[in-house]
Image: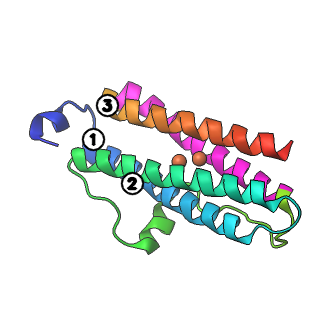
Amino acid sequence: MGEYGRKMVEGNVDELIAELNKAYADEWLAFFYYKTAAELAEGLNHEAVADKFNEIADEELHHAEELAERIGQLGGEVIREFDEIKAQANCKNVNIPKDPTDLKGFLKAGIEAEQCAIKVYEKLLKQLKNDYKDSITFHVIRHIMQEEVEHEDDFETLLG
Ligand SMILES: [Fe+2]
Ligand SMILES: [Fe+2]
């Protein structure tokens, strides 16, 4: 982003970029774990569960792209090293069950992961409104959070 776009943000832009990078790391990890869950799921009716993990994984990757775009606009740079992705993430693990036929366990892991993401974005939205007063990033994060809420609901629906 140009100089004026950066100045539009109140508060510490570098801190905001760091927060966005932590969320960026979360999205990469969610993508990785959900693709892995889709691959590992076995047993009766595992297709529906695998399809859902694949579908949501693609949306998480898209979230990473949206965050990356905003980080760039703010004059920041995305995390370059995968070690740093793991180190900086807020939500570091999706607890995929050892038993690949434990599909309920898979879905519960997905729900937990979505709840972690929702909490992160809820906090970030408050900061964007009250501290950074950054309506553009607010809009991006609100859109992402809305999809996280849908993901949680999708997993819950499959869990039954
Ligand atoms: Fe996401
Ligand atoms: Fe999600």
Q: Earlier in the sequence, mark 3 or mark 1?
A: 1
Q: Is residue 99 above or below residue 71?
A: below
Q: Earlier in the sequence, mark 2 or mark 3?
A: 2
Cα separation, mark 1 vs mark 2, equals 14 Å
- Pointer 3: residues within 10 angstroms few (<14), some, or many (20+)? some
Question: In the image, which disc is placed on residue 103?
Answer: none
Cα separation, mark 3 vs mark 1, equals 16 Å
144 displayed left or right of 112: left
Question: In the image, which disc is placed on residue 21?
Answer: 2
Q: Nearer the viewer, residue 9 or 110?
A: 110
Label 3: which secondary element: helix
Label 1: which secondary element: loop
> Is residue 133 in sight in this rendering?
no
Q: Nearer the viewer, residue 27 or 58?
A: 58
Q: Are marks 2 and 3 in contact (CB under 8 Å)?
A: no
Q: Which residue is mark 3?
A: 136
Q: Is residue 142 magenta?
A: no
Q: Where does residue 15 sit, x and y in percent of width and height?
A: 33, 47
Q: Quadrant of the N terminus?
A: top left
